[in-house]
Image (cartoon, grey):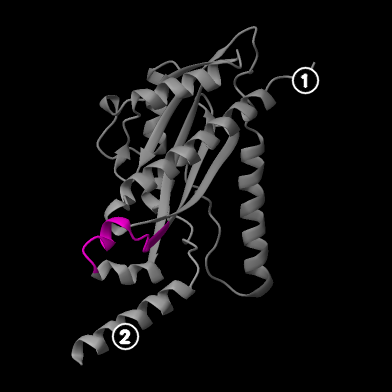
């Protein structure tokens, strides 16, 4: 009797979980990570006050900050006549990530084919243990780079069981019954700045979402996340190529 009740409870649980859709939430980019992707804004915008006086003070402070930003002009020109040096770094929550050789080759192949850029990479060996944006800029300057592209990748994961999971109660069920479903959503975000004056050349993004249905034994969460992150990064590279081409002077 108890066994029958347990089976019924399990079936109800599987039915309920199988009715919902798999839609992972957008990946979370940690504040420490975002602080490495771009310089923080420091303005003297008032935080307290009353009525029109506060509104006016906030507007004037913003106007001043905007005017200062608009004074910054491109320090380099993207052209095939004189290719520029682009320093690339993948940033993480604890510093700079090591870019694997395959990804380095993919970056060089994709971006250098434009004929306007030579790619180099910022290594953690010339940075402190917890570098911020401004230290990244100094590192790019040490490498004599003209511009630097900083990017980050994050993902979110969601899973559930379906009706086939009932067969997991059998010996062969865990290996052959496709009772587990999983989904991953990965984002890649990047920004390219002039090393000399922090002029923002362009921003780029990549996205990948994928789902799979597998037996429990063959569901590899880490591989699914890795594949999705690589795909998002591939799209980011494609967008970088488009952005580089868009910076070429119009003839």
Q: Is residue 167 above or below residue 132?
A: below
Tell me how many marks there are: 2
Q: Residue at x 46, y 34 (%)?
A: 150
Would you call the spot at circle 2 few (<14 residues within 10 Å), some (14-19), or many (20 or more)?
A: few
Secondary structure beneath label 1: loop
Residue, disc 2: 8
Residue 54, image x, y percentages: 62, 68
**Can residue 96 be seen from the camera position used here?**
yes
Residue 184, image x, y percentages: 44, 53
The extreme right residue here reads 251
Residue, disc 1: 250
Residue 64, image x, y percentages: 64, 47
The extreme top residue here reads 81
Residue 180 shown in magenta: yes
**Can residue 200 be seen from the camera position used here?**
no
Would you call the spot at circle 1 few (<14 residues within 10 Å), some (14-19), or many (20 or more)?
A: few
Front-lying residue, 188 or 226? 226
Front-lying residue, 26 or 74? 26
Asked if the residue under mark 1 is in contact with the one under mark 2, i.e. CB atoms within 8 Å, the reply is no
Quadrant of residue 74 in the image?
top right
Q: Is residue 176 above or below residue 233?
A: below
Secondary structure beneath label 2: helix
Whole-number angstrom distance, CA of label 2 to CA of label 1: 69 Å
Q: Residue at x 57, y 15 (%)?
A: 113
- The magenta segment is 170-182
Residue 165, image x, y percentages: 34, 68
- Residue 60 numbered mark, or none: none
Q: Residue at x 31, y 80 (%)?
A: 10
Quadrant of residue 129 in the image?
top left
């Amino acid at each position: 009797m108890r066994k029958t009740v347990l089976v019924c409870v399990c079936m109800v649980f599987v039915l309920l979980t199988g009715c919902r859709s798999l839609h992972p939430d957008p990946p979370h980019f940690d504040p420490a990570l975002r602080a490495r992707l771009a310089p923080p804004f420091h303005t003297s915008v008032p935080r307290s006050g009353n009525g029109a006086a506060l509104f006016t003070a906030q507007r004037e402070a913003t106007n001043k900050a905007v005017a200062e930003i608009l004074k910054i002009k491109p320090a380099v020109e993207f052209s095939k006549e004189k290719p520029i040096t682009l320093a690339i770094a993948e940033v993480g929550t604890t510093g700079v990530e090591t870019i694997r050789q395959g990804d380095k080759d993919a970056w060089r192949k994709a971006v250098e084919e434009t004929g306007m850029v030579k790619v180099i990479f910022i290594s953690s060996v010339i940075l402190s243990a917890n570098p911020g944006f401004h230290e990244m800029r100094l590192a790019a300057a040490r490498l004599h780079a003209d511009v630097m592209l900083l990017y980050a990748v994050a993902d979110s994961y969601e899973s559930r069981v379906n009706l086939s999971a009932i067969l997991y109660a059998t010996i062969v069920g865990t290996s052959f019954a496709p009772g587990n479903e999983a989904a991953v959503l990965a984002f890649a975000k990047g920004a390219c700045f002039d090393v000399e004056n922090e002029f923002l050349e362009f921003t780029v993004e990549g996205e990948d979402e994928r789902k799979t249905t597998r037996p429990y034994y063959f569901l590899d969460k880490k591989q699914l996340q890795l594949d999705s992150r690589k795909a998002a990064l591939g799209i980011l590279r494609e967008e970088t190529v488009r952005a580089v081409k868009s910076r070429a002077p119009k003839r």
